[in-house]
Image (cartoon, rainbow, N blue to C red):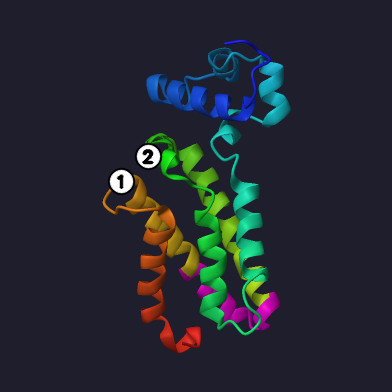
Amino acid sequence: MARWQPDARGRLLHAAIELFGEQGYDATTAAQIAERAGLTKTTLFRHFADKREILFQGQDMLVGLATEGVRDAPRDSAPFALVRAGVLALSTLHPAESRETGRLVDEILAASSELQERATFKRAAITAALYTAVVERTGDPRQAGVLADAGIRAYYDGFAAWVEGSEDGPLAEVVEHELAAYERMLAPVAGS
C-alpha cells in the first residue's frame, strides 16, 4: 500500500485491529501497526500519542456529538428528551459497516486491562460532556447527573446489543429502544 493513500487514521485502525487480534495488544508494536497500514511510525505518532489511542480515536467526536445533540434540542424539551437528543446524536457516528469493527474492538478490549481502563475513561468523558450540556439547559446538576448516567448506560447497552447482533436495525433504533426502557424506569425524575 502506498504511503500517500488517504485515510491514514482508518488504515491505522484496521491494521491495529488485525494485529491486536492476531498477536495480542501487548505483543504488538506501533512500528508493526504502521508497517501493516503502509505508513511510517512517524505518521502514526503524528496522529496518535500511542498505539492504544488508535482504538479510541472517535472520543472527541462522541463528546462533541453529545454536546451538540443537547444544545440543538428544542427549547422546551423535557430533561430526558435532552438526554435522548444527546445520546441519539452519538449513534450517528456508527454506520452499519462499523458493526463488525465494534465487535472486533470489544474482543480486543476484553483481553486487555490497560485498554479496559482507557475505555472507562472514554465513557466517563462522554458522560461528563452529556452531564455538562444537560446542566446548562436545565440548571439542575443532580437531575442531570442521574439522567446523563442513565443515557450513557442506555447508549452502551444498545451498542453492545447492536454489535453482538442480538438487535437488528440501525444503531439509533436499538439505542432508542434502550432509552425508552430507561425513561419508563426514570419517569418521575425525567419530567415525563
- The residues colored magenta run 136-150
The local secondary structure at tag 2 comes to: helix
Residue 47 left/right relative to 107: right
Residue appearing at x 69%, y 25% in the figure: 45
Q: Looking at the picture, how far across and down is residue 58, in whole percent?
A: 59, 44
Would you identify the image quadrant in which residue 46 lies? top right
- Residue 131 vertical position relative to residue 37 in the rendered view, above or below: below
Would you identify the image quadrant in which residue 125 lies? bottom right
Q: Looking at the picture, how far across and down is residue 176, in whole percent?
A: 41, 66
Q: Dot 1: within a 10 Å radius of its alpha carbon, few (fewer than 14), some, or many (20 or more) residues? A: some
Q: Which residue is mark 1?
A: 164
Counting residues from the start of the chain, the first of labels 1 and 2 encountered is: 2
Nearest to the observer: residue 175 or residue 50: 175
Residue contact between numbered discs 1 and 2, judged by CB atoms under 8 Å: yes
Question: Marks 1/2: CA distance?
Answer: 7 Å
- Dominant secondary-structure state across the stretch colored magenta: helix
Q: Amino acid at mark 2?
A: Arg
Nearest to the observer: residue 123 or residue 154: 154
Q: Identify the disc placed on residue 103.
A: 2
Q: Amino acid at mark 1?
A: Glu
Residue 35 left/right relative to 185: right
Would you identify the image quadrant in which residue 69 lies? bottom right
